[in-house]
Image (cartoon, helix red, strand yellow):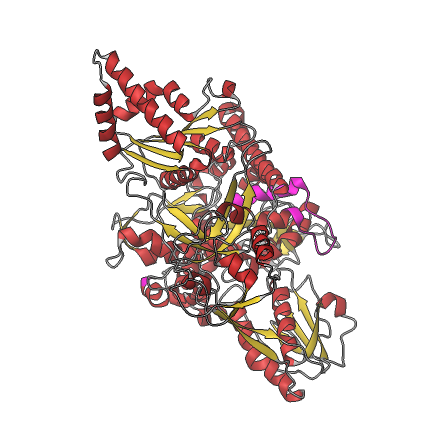
Amino acid sequence: MTETIPGPPGLPFLGNINDVDRINPTTSLARFADTYELVNEVCDEKRFHKIVSGGLNQVRNGTRYGLFTARTGEHHWEVAHRTLMPAFGPLSIQSMFEEMHDIASQLVVNESGARASRPAIAGYFMRATNQKYEEDMALMANTAEELMNERRKHPIDKKDLLNAMLFGKDPKTGESMSDESIRDNMITFLIAAQKEVDDVIGTNAITIEHMSKLPYIDACLKETLRLNPTAPAFAVTPRDDLPNSDQPVFIGGGKYEVKPGMPIIILSAPTQRDPKVYGSDAREFKPERMLPEAFSKLPPGAWKPFGNGSRGCIGRPFAWQEAILTVAILLQCFDFRQHDPSYELQFKSTLTIKPLDFFMHASLRKHIDPNQLEKMIHSGKMEMKTSDHGRKGSIAGTTKKPKKPMTVLYGSNAGTCEALAQSVARNASRHGYDAKVDTLDTAVDNVPKDQPVVIITAKWMQKLEDNKLKGVNYAVFGCGNPKGATRITEIGLADVAEGDVFSDFDKWQDEKLWTALGVESDGSEEAGIEVEINTDTRRSRLRQDVKEAEVISNELLTADGVTEKRHIVLRMPTGMEYRVGDYLAVLPLNHPKNVRRVLKWAKLPWDAMLTLKNGANTTLPTGHPVSAFDIMSAYLELTQPATRKRFLGVASNYLSNVEAGDRIHVAVKASHGQFHPPNDIEKTPIIMMCAGTGLAPFRGFVQERAQQIRAGRKLAPAYLFIGCAHPEKDQLFKTEFDQWQKDGVVEVFYAFSRCTEHSKGCKHVQDRVWEEREQMKKVFDQGAKLYVCGSAGVGEGVAKMLKRIYEEAAEAVGKHKTEEEIEEWWLGVKSDRYASDVFA
């Protein structure tokens, strides 16, 4: 005999509306759970699956088939889930570290909870709110479409989430994600302790290697989510895709009947505060219970802040790395104290929960220099993997001895096990083996018996469903089950959610796998050649204070018919500092065409070796053979009379041909003191004037302003005058500047020399300054600082126009100025409020 599911008594018509806190409904529901029973069995995926209802139904209007709001069994969700699992594996998440280092906040859905919590009939009377809701949905959808189109037009090699969605394939069906599914999931992704820091990181920049060495921060985050999970509940319903699904389903030891389609809300917080698991202090904050050893002993289901089973949060590794990184940076730099010591925790509920009106005061720690803070945080981010002074490595030689076969099988759908399998295969060659890498699925019915088999596999959400392990039982890293065969070595284990799986794997490989195989084999190992690589010889010979930088991209910005202009992005060497407005000096190589011309003149073959005798104070390499081609390419200036004083004339040719991955020698050279943003940027307006590539430093100025405004600073206005040829051929970084104008970062004025009808008839940048002189006079009177960058003609033209504006302003108030007085005024401006960088 079943019982009625217990609950609080309700009022006629109103039901239990007065029993639920509208501001924080989950608190009320948690109180009911404590009172009327806590049912754990509904988390069994064999009997129940996720149901999308309530607030999620409103979010679904925007995300539709996204991973978060798709209904169980929808084909879009199945394809997207299998396709995106590799993008959320540890290897992919680690590759996102630099972006996470820069971006510490995520967009959250703000209004969905309010819409979901009001009665359906109320929507009829809230037409303006509904219209805004629909507009917001459309904006997110359009933004997603634009991002997809932009990536397809300009693809990149980076393995990020967008590439995974656009180009990934479902490993089961071979299908790609539809544009509709990609858009839905893009919108879904938008929603989505100091002593330890001092000991592990100190004042160094935080790197990916630190993430696994902060167990106390990790424990604090786990304990926080145990007590107050940000996603406080999830809903399930009895499965309707099983045999006899039309029969009643009973829970609570057969006491209560539930039916398919009936939402059952599982509250994470009460589940995670069970005194039977956590003791009498289960409601207290004790991070020690979440340290690795104690956490590993928790029973299944005792910690579920990321949801349940196959519908649990696919982005957990992403969120976890981001959280540890953010907390570590904050604790490294700041001391915190509560704004109101008497504050008692209250919650604000939307789709997630967060503290209500809880504020902290952050103050820089005593040993942190505020002027060095940005350098400290970012200096390690672009660290080169090789030093400037030299690199050592081993290049495998060849051996005539035949290699023994080996099979390496991996089984997971997150990409990590495949990466580890490839690592074994690479190392196998050094140990006398020819390794073949394949998936467990392909070998499940035909495991080789005449060679070592290394199995690398992982459990996913407590179950291995995608790949099989039948009969596979040799050397195992991850999880396995020996069934009769001889195990080569003991199993290796690593938790991809905790710790550093790659370090654990390397240790297992070196200390267990190869040691065991070495005993059974003849110990043959491939011979190698030790190579020492030195990248400083040329710079030291030429007495240039340069370091090695890596080219990230080289993009042509202009169309045919105008002077070529390029945007080259470099990964700078560690410790090389620069300020906005500084120069980047490049130590170039001569163009091969010029080198061949000189070799032909000297009647030298390209591979001729020259030995220069020690003698004069030369910058050329002496005392040992060097190829003529190298000397002509790297040490001599071939476009002007040879001299060791300066190396100029070939940078444009050289830089225009560099490619991503190339390494070049660079140095930052400080510009003169005036050519930097003003110290008091909140009170001093700036007026920037440029033409052509003179835009380069001012793009840096505006980028820095954009970052400062995003950080909450209120800046004085900025104005930028740009001279170029044609709006469709060389309007550089148009999209960026359009967005910055929309954001209030800068106001831009163009002068198009070949299309003046698009620039108020102005042909040159100084003409546009004259056109806007009334506004600029007001800004100048407010103390604006003036900057000019471009050719000598630009500098002269702008100076002449500024003097003319001054003369006109004086005439307007009845003051005639002589040429001497105008020049005296101009000298005064140049000495204090004017900075120029003019080139030939």
Number of callouts: 0
Q: Where is residue 582 in the image (x, y as percent from the top left)?
A: 36, 45
What residue range appears in magenta? Answer: 166-194
**Looking at the image, can residue 117 be seen?**
no
Q: Which residue is drawn at 56% across and 79% down?
A: 510
Left or right of 145 in this view: 767: left
Q: Taking 106 as reference, is 408 above or below it?
A: below
Looking at the image, which residue sits at the far right?
Answer: 446
Question: Looking at this view, is 231 or 143 the one in front?
Answer: 143
Magenta-colored stretch includes residue 253: no
Occupied quadrant, residue 602: bottom right
Question: Looking at this view, is 335 or 678 the one in front?
Answer: 678
**Looking at the image, can residue 76 be seen?**
yes
Q: Taking 239 as reference, is 695 above or below it?
A: above
Occupied quadrant, residue 814: top left
Q: Residue at x 26, y 48 (%)?
A: 339
Q: Where is residue 120 in the image (x, y as percent from the top left)?
A: 54, 31
Q: Where is residue 763 in the image (x, y as percent from the top left)?
A: 46, 22
Magenta-colored stretch includes residue 184: yes
Question: Looking at this view, is 210 or 791 the one in front?
Answer: 791
Occupied quadrant, residue 243: bottom right
Q: Quarter holding the C terminus?
A: top left
Question: Looking at this view, is 406 or 446 the one in front?
Answer: 406
Q: Quarter holding the N terminus?
A: bottom right
Q: Which residue is drawn at 66% across and 52% down?
A: 83
Left or right of 294 in this view: 561: right
Left or right of 389 in this view: 421: right
Q: Position of residue 369 (x, y in %)?
A: 26, 55
